[in-house]
Image (cartoon, rainbow, N blue to C red):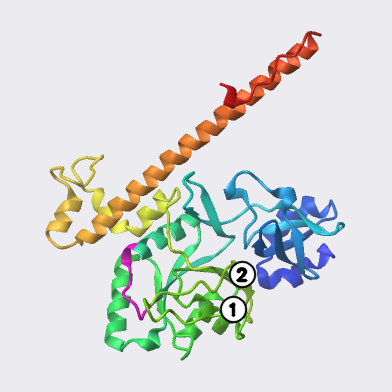
Amino acid sequence: MNSSTSGPALAGYGWNASLAADFTPYAAQGYVPARILRVYGNLCDAVTPDGTVRADIAPVTSPDPLRWVCTGDWAALDPGGDPVLVRALLPRRTAIVRNTSSKRSEGQVLAANVDHVAVAVPADAEPDLGRLERFLALAWESGAEPLVLFTKCDLVPAPELEHLLSDAESVAPGVTVLAVSASTGMGMDVLTAVLTGTTTVFVGQSGAGKSTLSNALVGDEVQDVRAIRDADGKGRHTTTTRDMLLLPGGGVIVDTPGVRGVGMWDAQTGVGLVFSEIEELAGACRFHDCSHTAEPGCAVLEAVADGTLHQRRLESYRKLLRENAWIASRTDARLRAEQRREWKLRTAEGRMMTGLKRGGPAPRARSPRDR
Protein backbone atom coordinates (compact mmCIF):
# COMPACT_ATOMS: atom_id res chain seq x y z
CA MET A 1 0.00 0.00 0.00
CA ASN A 2 1.25 3.44 -0.88
CA SER A 3 -0.05 6.42 1.10
CA SER A 4 1.57 8.84 -1.34
CA THR A 5 -1.09 7.98 -3.93
CA SER A 6 -3.94 8.40 -1.49
CA GLY A 7 -5.10 11.70 -2.98
CA PRO A 8 -6.29 10.50 -6.41
CA ALA A 9 -7.28 7.02 -5.23
CA LEU A 10 -9.47 8.19 -2.32
CA ALA A 11 -10.69 11.50 -3.73
CA GLY A 12 -14.05 10.02 -4.71
CA TYR A 13 -14.55 8.94 -1.09
CA GLY A 14 -13.96 12.44 0.25
CA TRP A 15 -10.20 12.57 0.83
CA ASN A 16 -8.95 16.16 0.93
CA ALA A 17 -6.08 18.38 2.07
CA SER A 18 -7.45 18.70 5.60
CA LEU A 19 -7.55 14.92 6.04
CA ALA A 20 -4.06 14.64 4.56
CA ALA A 21 -2.79 17.09 7.19
CA ASP A 22 -4.46 15.09 9.98
CA PHE A 23 -2.87 11.93 8.62
CA THR A 24 0.71 13.30 8.50
CA PRO A 25 1.92 11.76 11.80
CA TYR A 26 0.52 8.36 10.81
CA ALA A 27 2.17 8.48 7.38
CA ALA A 28 5.49 8.95 9.17
CA GLN A 29 4.88 5.61 10.91
CA GLY A 30 4.33 3.79 7.63
CA TYR A 31 0.56 3.59 7.99
CA VAL A 32 -1.85 4.10 5.09
CA PRO A 33 -5.12 6.07 5.00
CA ALA A 34 -8.45 4.33 4.55
CA ARG A 35 -12.16 4.95 4.83
CA ILE A 36 -14.35 2.43 6.63
CA LEU A 37 -16.99 0.99 4.28
CA ARG A 38 -18.76 -1.39 6.68
CA VAL A 39 -18.16 -3.08 10.03
CA TYR A 40 -18.63 -6.73 11.06
CA GLY A 41 -17.98 -7.17 14.77
CA ASN A 42 -14.21 -6.81 15.20
CA LEU A 43 -13.57 -6.67 11.46
CA CYS A 44 -14.26 -4.06 8.83
CA ASP A 45 -13.96 -3.46 5.11
CA ALA A 46 -11.97 -0.36 4.25
CA VAL A 47 -10.99 1.32 1.01
CA THR A 48 -7.30 2.24 0.70
CA PRO A 49 -5.16 3.76 -2.07
CA ASP A 50 -4.66 0.22 -3.40
CA GLY A 51 -8.22 -1.03 -3.14
CA THR A 52 -10.50 -2.61 -0.55
CA VAL A 53 -9.10 -4.64 2.34
CA ARG A 54 -10.47 -6.53 5.34
CA ALA A 55 -8.99 -5.14 8.57
CA ASP A 56 -9.06 -5.94 12.29
CA ILE A 57 -10.35 -3.10 14.47
CA ALA A 58 -9.37 -4.71 17.79
CA PRO A 59 -6.36 -2.38 18.39
CA VAL A 60 -8.65 0.66 18.65
CA THR A 61 -11.54 -0.98 20.49
CA SER A 62 -12.83 1.33 23.22
CA PRO A 63 -15.24 0.81 26.15
CA ASP A 64 -17.04 3.96 24.99
CA PRO A 65 -19.58 3.09 22.24
CA LEU A 66 -19.26 6.61 20.84
CA ARG A 67 -15.64 5.82 19.96
CA TRP A 68 -16.29 2.51 18.22
CA VAL A 69 -15.22 2.25 14.60
CA CYS A 70 -18.16 2.88 12.30
CA THR A 71 -18.98 3.35 8.63
CA GLY A 72 -17.63 6.65 7.37
CA ASP A 73 -14.64 6.84 9.70
CA TRP A 74 -11.23 7.74 8.30
CA ALA A 75 -8.56 5.47 9.70
CA ALA A 76 -4.82 4.77 9.78
CA LEU A 77 -4.10 1.16 8.78
CA ASP A 78 -1.00 -0.85 9.56
CA PRO A 79 -0.46 -2.89 6.38
CA GLY A 80 2.43 -4.95 7.76
CA GLY A 81 0.47 -7.63 9.54
CA ASP A 82 -1.93 -10.39 8.61
CA PRO A 83 -4.62 -9.31 9.03
CA VAL A 84 -4.24 -5.61 8.35
CA LEU A 85 -4.80 -3.63 11.56
CA VAL A 86 -6.66 -0.40 12.24
CA ARG A 87 -4.25 1.61 14.40
CA ALA A 88 -6.08 4.92 14.81
CA LEU A 89 -9.10 6.95 13.75
CA LEU A 90 -8.81 10.47 12.40
CA PRO A 91 -10.93 13.13 14.15
CA ARG A 92 -14.58 13.03 13.07
CA ARG A 93 -16.08 16.12 11.43
CA THR A 94 -19.64 14.99 12.04
CA ALA A 95 -21.38 12.00 13.59
CA ILE A 96 -25.06 11.06 13.70
CA VAL A 97 -25.77 9.53 17.10
CA ARG A 98 -28.91 7.96 18.52
CA ASN A 99 -29.71 6.41 21.87
CA THR A 100 -29.72 2.62 21.81
CA SER A 101 -32.46 0.47 23.28
CA SER A 102 -30.02 -0.54 26.02
CA LYS A 103 -31.06 0.26 29.60
CA ARG A 104 -27.57 1.72 30.06
CA SER A 105 -28.54 4.74 27.93
CA GLU A 106 -25.65 4.36 25.53
CA GLY A 107 -25.13 6.33 22.36
CA GLN A 108 -24.66 4.62 19.00
CA VAL A 109 -22.94 6.32 16.06
CA LEU A 110 -24.86 5.47 12.89
CA ALA A 111 -22.32 7.07 10.53
CA ALA A 112 -19.37 9.45 10.73
CA ASN A 113 -17.99 12.27 8.59
CA VAL A 114 -21.21 12.81 6.64
CA ASP A 115 -22.31 15.98 4.84
CA HIS A 116 -26.00 15.12 4.53
CA VAL A 117 -28.42 13.08 6.60
CA ALA A 118 -31.22 12.10 4.22
CA VAL A 119 -34.40 11.00 6.00
CA ALA A 120 -36.31 8.65 3.70
CA VAL A 121 -40.09 8.79 4.07
CA PRO A 122 -42.32 6.49 1.96
CA ALA A 123 -44.97 8.56 0.19
CA ASP A 124 -47.34 5.58 -0.06
CA ALA A 125 -47.86 5.40 3.72
CA GLU A 126 -49.28 7.79 6.29
CA PRO A 127 -46.30 9.90 7.39
CA ASP A 128 -45.36 9.95 11.05
CA LEU A 129 -44.47 13.61 11.58
CA GLY A 130 -43.25 12.95 15.12
CA ARG A 131 -40.76 10.35 13.85
CA LEU A 132 -39.63 12.76 11.14
CA GLU A 133 -39.01 15.46 13.76
CA ARG A 134 -36.90 13.01 15.76
CA PHE A 135 -34.74 12.12 12.77
CA LEU A 136 -34.30 15.78 11.91
CA ALA A 137 -33.23 16.64 15.46
CA LEU A 138 -30.53 13.95 15.35
CA ALA A 139 -29.50 15.10 11.88
CA TRP A 140 -29.07 18.75 12.91
CA GLU A 141 -27.21 17.69 16.05
CA SER A 142 -24.76 15.63 14.00
CA GLY A 143 -23.34 18.73 12.35
CA ALA A 144 -24.47 17.58 8.91
CA GLU A 145 -27.20 19.07 6.73
CA PRO A 146 -30.58 17.29 6.87
CA LEU A 147 -32.60 16.36 3.79
CA VAL A 148 -36.10 14.89 3.59
CA LEU A 149 -36.67 12.46 0.74
CA PHE A 150 -40.20 11.31 -0.07
CA THR A 151 -39.68 8.00 -1.87
CA LYS A 152 -42.06 5.95 -4.06
CA CYS A 153 -43.74 9.17 -5.19
CA ASP A 154 -45.00 7.47 -8.37
CA LEU A 155 -47.47 5.53 -6.18
CA VAL A 156 -49.50 8.54 -5.00
CA PRO A 157 -51.57 11.06 -6.97
CA ALA A 158 -50.17 14.56 -7.43
CA PRO A 159 -52.62 16.36 -5.07
CA GLU A 160 -51.85 13.93 -2.24
CA LEU A 161 -48.12 14.29 -2.86
CA GLU A 162 -48.38 18.07 -2.66
CA HIS A 163 -50.15 17.71 0.68
CA LEU A 164 -47.40 15.39 1.99
CA LEU A 165 -44.66 17.78 0.92
CA SER A 166 -46.45 20.70 2.54
CA ASP A 167 -46.82 18.81 5.83
CA ALA A 168 -43.13 17.88 5.80
CA GLU A 169 -42.02 21.43 5.07
CA SER A 170 -44.10 22.66 8.02
CA VAL A 171 -42.12 20.46 10.46
CA ALA A 172 -38.74 20.85 8.75
CA PRO A 173 -37.86 24.56 8.71
CA GLY A 174 -34.75 25.27 6.68
CA VAL A 175 -34.59 21.71 5.30
CA THR A 176 -34.74 20.75 1.61
CA VAL A 177 -37.67 18.41 0.92
CA LEU A 178 -37.51 16.38 -2.30
CA ALA A 179 -39.97 14.04 -4.00
CA VAL A 180 -38.28 11.12 -5.79
CA SER A 181 -39.08 7.80 -7.41
CA ALA A 182 -36.38 5.24 -8.12
CA SER A 183 -38.64 3.34 -10.52
CA THR A 184 -39.66 6.26 -12.76
CA GLY A 185 -36.66 8.52 -12.23
CA MET A 186 -38.80 11.32 -10.83
CA GLY A 187 -36.58 13.88 -9.05
CA MET A 188 -33.47 11.69 -9.35
CA ASP A 189 -31.53 14.26 -11.38
CA VAL A 190 -32.03 16.87 -8.66
CA LEU A 191 -31.09 14.40 -5.92
CA THR A 192 -27.97 13.28 -7.81
CA ALA A 193 -26.85 16.87 -8.18
CA VAL A 194 -27.28 17.47 -4.44
CA LEU A 195 -25.38 14.34 -3.39
CA THR A 196 -22.50 14.32 -5.90
CA GLY A 197 -19.14 14.96 -4.25
CA THR A 198 -20.51 14.58 -0.73
CA THR A 199 -21.06 11.86 1.88
CA THR A 200 -24.74 11.17 2.58
CA VAL A 201 -26.28 8.71 5.01
CA PHE A 202 -29.80 7.42 4.37
CA VAL A 203 -31.90 6.86 7.51
CA GLY A 204 -35.51 5.86 7.98
CA GLN A 205 -37.82 3.02 8.81
CA SER A 206 -37.76 -0.38 7.11
CA GLY A 207 -39.57 -0.33 3.80
CA ALA A 208 -38.86 3.34 3.14
CA GLY A 209 -37.02 2.45 -0.07
CA LYS A 210 -33.49 3.36 1.02
CA SER A 211 -31.82 0.39 -0.68
CA THR A 212 -33.85 0.79 -3.86
CA LEU A 213 -32.85 4.43 -3.95
CA SER A 214 -29.21 3.47 -3.36
CA ASN A 215 -29.28 1.07 -6.31
CA ALA A 216 -30.76 3.75 -8.56
CA LEU A 217 -28.11 6.30 -7.57
CA VAL A 218 -25.22 3.85 -7.98
CA GLY A 219 -26.63 2.49 -11.24
CA ASP A 220 -26.35 -1.15 -10.23
CA GLU A 221 -28.10 -3.73 -8.04
CA VAL A 222 -25.59 -3.42 -5.21
CA GLN A 223 -28.14 -3.72 -2.39
CA ASP A 224 -30.73 -6.46 -1.89
CA VAL A 225 -34.31 -5.23 -1.82
CA ARG A 226 -37.55 -6.94 -0.81
CA ALA A 227 -41.18 -6.02 -1.10
CA ILE A 228 -43.00 -4.84 2.01
CA ARG A 229 -45.22 -7.36 3.78
CA ASP A 230 -48.76 -7.46 2.42
CA ALA A 231 -50.16 -8.28 5.87
CA ASP A 232 -49.24 -5.06 7.58
CA GLY A 233 -47.48 -2.95 4.97
CA LYS A 234 -44.25 -2.93 6.98
CA GLY A 235 -40.81 -3.27 5.48
CA ARG A 236 -38.46 -6.19 5.92
CA HIS A 237 -34.92 -5.66 7.20
CA THR A 238 -33.03 -6.32 3.95
CA THR A 239 -29.99 -4.18 4.76
CA THR A 240 -28.24 -5.57 7.84
CA THR A 241 -25.04 -3.51 7.85
CA ARG A 242 -24.26 0.13 7.17
CA ASP A 243 -22.79 0.03 3.69
CA MET A 244 -20.84 2.82 2.00
CA LEU A 245 -21.37 2.94 -1.76
CA LEU A 246 -19.43 4.99 -4.32
CA LEU A 247 -21.48 7.22 -6.64
CA PRO A 248 -20.53 7.28 -10.35
CA GLY A 249 -19.94 11.05 -10.32
CA GLY A 250 -17.96 11.06 -7.07
CA GLY A 251 -19.11 11.10 -3.49
CA VAL A 252 -20.61 8.29 -1.45
CA ILE A 253 -23.87 7.23 0.15
CA VAL A 254 -24.32 5.12 3.28
CA ASP A 255 -27.29 2.76 3.22
CA THR A 256 -28.43 1.82 6.73
CA PRO A 257 -30.78 -0.82 8.15
CA GLY A 258 -34.29 0.34 8.97
CA VAL A 259 -34.54 2.00 12.36
CA ARG A 260 -37.62 1.32 14.50
CA GLY A 261 -36.59 3.30 17.57
CA VAL A 262 -35.28 6.82 17.13
CA GLY A 263 -33.94 7.55 20.59
CA MET A 264 -32.67 11.03 21.37
CA TRP A 265 -29.05 11.47 22.41
CA ASP A 266 -27.83 14.83 23.69
CA ALA A 267 -29.72 16.60 20.90
CA GLN A 268 -31.01 19.77 22.57
CA THR A 269 -29.48 21.99 19.89
CA GLY A 270 -30.99 19.80 17.18
CA VAL A 271 -34.42 19.94 18.81
CA GLY A 272 -34.17 23.72 18.92
CA LEU A 273 -33.41 23.86 15.19
CA VAL A 274 -36.28 21.55 14.28
CA PHE A 275 -38.69 23.64 16.35
CA SER A 276 -37.12 26.99 15.49
CA GLU A 277 -40.49 28.75 15.32
CA ILE A 278 -41.24 27.75 18.93
CA GLU A 279 -37.79 28.85 20.06
CA GLU A 280 -38.40 32.20 18.38
CA LEU A 281 -41.82 32.59 20.02
CA ALA A 282 -40.31 31.72 23.40
CA GLY A 283 -38.18 34.82 23.19
CA ALA A 284 -41.33 36.92 23.51
CA CYS A 285 -42.65 35.15 26.62
CA ARG A 286 -43.07 37.27 29.76
CA PHE A 287 -40.82 34.97 31.81
CA HIS A 288 -37.42 33.94 30.53
CA ASP A 289 -37.79 30.47 32.09
CA CYS A 290 -41.32 29.95 30.76
CA SER A 291 -42.24 26.26 30.41
CA HIS A 292 -45.04 27.05 27.94
CA THR A 293 -47.62 25.15 29.96
CA ALA A 294 -49.76 27.62 31.94
CA GLU A 295 -47.75 30.80 32.55
CA PRO A 296 -49.36 34.17 31.91
CA GLY A 297 -47.91 36.09 29.00
CA CYS A 298 -46.66 32.94 27.25
CA ALA A 299 -46.20 33.80 23.57
CA VAL A 300 -46.07 30.10 22.64
CA LEU A 301 -49.48 29.36 24.19
CA GLU A 302 -50.91 32.48 22.59
CA ALA A 303 -49.72 31.22 19.19
CA VAL A 304 -51.47 27.90 19.82
CA ALA A 305 -54.66 29.73 20.86
CA ASP A 306 -54.79 31.88 17.72
CA GLY A 307 -53.90 28.98 15.39
CA THR A 308 -50.44 30.24 14.46
CA LEU A 309 -48.84 27.19 16.10
CA HIS A 310 -50.34 23.71 15.95
CA GLN A 311 -50.93 21.96 19.28
CA ARG A 312 -49.36 18.73 17.98
CA ARG A 313 -46.18 20.61 17.20
CA LEU A 314 -45.92 22.02 20.74
CA GLU A 315 -46.58 18.62 22.30
CA SER A 316 -43.89 17.03 20.14
CA TYR A 317 -41.43 19.77 21.16
CA ARG A 318 -42.15 19.19 24.85
CA LYS A 319 -41.84 15.42 24.47
CA LEU A 320 -38.46 15.54 22.74
CA LEU A 321 -37.05 18.01 25.26
CA ARG A 322 -38.23 15.82 28.18
CA GLU A 323 -36.78 12.70 26.60
CA ASN A 324 -33.49 14.42 25.82
CA ALA A 325 -33.22 15.74 29.39
CA TRP A 326 -33.95 12.28 30.81
CA ILE A 327 -31.29 10.65 28.62
CA ALA A 328 -28.78 13.34 29.60
CA SER A 329 -29.44 12.75 33.30
CA ARG A 330 -29.09 8.97 32.88
CA THR A 331 -25.87 9.43 30.95
CA ASP A 332 -24.42 11.83 33.52
CA ALA A 333 -25.28 9.42 36.34
CA ARG A 334 -23.65 6.53 34.50
CA LEU A 335 -20.51 8.55 33.80
CA ARG A 336 -20.27 9.63 37.43
CA ALA A 337 -20.62 6.00 38.56
CA GLU A 338 -17.90 4.89 36.15
CA GLN A 339 -15.63 7.68 37.35
CA ARG A 340 -16.18 6.62 40.97
CA ARG A 341 -15.34 3.01 40.12
CA GLU A 342 -12.17 4.07 38.32
CA TRP A 343 -11.15 6.31 41.24
CA LYS A 344 -11.64 3.47 43.73
CA LEU A 345 -9.57 1.10 41.63
CA ARG A 346 -6.74 3.63 41.37
CA THR A 347 -6.89 4.29 45.11
CA ALA A 348 -6.63 0.58 45.83
CA GLU A 349 -3.70 0.21 43.42
CA GLY A 350 -2.01 3.21 45.07
CA ARG A 351 -2.29 1.63 48.54
CA MET A 352 -0.82 -1.60 47.23
CA MET A 353 2.17 0.18 45.66
CA THR A 354 2.76 2.21 48.86
CA GLY A 355 2.85 -0.98 50.90
CA LEU A 356 5.38 -2.57 48.56
CA LYS A 357 7.63 0.50 48.64
CA ARG A 358 7.66 0.42 52.47
CA GLY A 359 8.76 -3.18 52.44
CA GLY A 360 5.71 -4.40 54.30
CA PRO A 361 2.91 -6.65 53.12
CA ALA A 362 0.84 -5.00 50.48
CA PRO A 363 -2.79 -4.48 51.40
CA ARG A 364 -5.24 -6.45 49.34
CA ALA A 365 -6.31 -4.47 46.28
CA ARG A 366 -10.04 -4.50 46.75
CA SER A 367 -12.48 -4.38 43.90
CA PRO A 368 -15.16 -1.69 43.95
CA ARG A 369 -17.64 -4.54 44.43
CA ASP A 370 -16.12 -5.09 47.90
CA ARG A 371 -17.23 -1.64 49.04
Q: State whether residue 67 is above or below residue 311.
A: above
Amino acid type of the residue that numbered disc 1 sits on in the rendered structure: Gln
Residue 16 visible somewhere in the drawing? no
Residue 309 placement (x, y as % from top left): 20, 60
On the rendered structure, is 283 left or right of 295?
Answer: right
The residue under the point 36% across, 48% down is 323
The residue beneath circle 1 is: 223
What secondary structure characterizes most of the magenta part?
Answer: loop
Q: Quick check: 230 left or right of 215? A: left
The answer to whether mark 2 and mark 1 are in CB contact below 8 A is yes
CA–CA distance between discs 2 and 1?
Answer: 9 Å
Task: Give yes or no for residue 128 being in the magenta stretch.
Answer: yes
Residue at x 76%, y 72% (from the top left corner): 9
Indicate the secondary structure of the residue bearing disc 2.
strand
Q: In this rendering, is residue 346 above or below 315?
A: above
- Furthest-front residue in view? 231
Q: Which residues are magenta?
A: 122-130
Which residue lies under the disc numbered 2?
243
| Closer to the camera in the image, 210 or 365 | 365
- Name the element at disc 1: loop
* Label 2 crowd bin: few (<14), some (14–19), many (20+), radius 10 Å: many
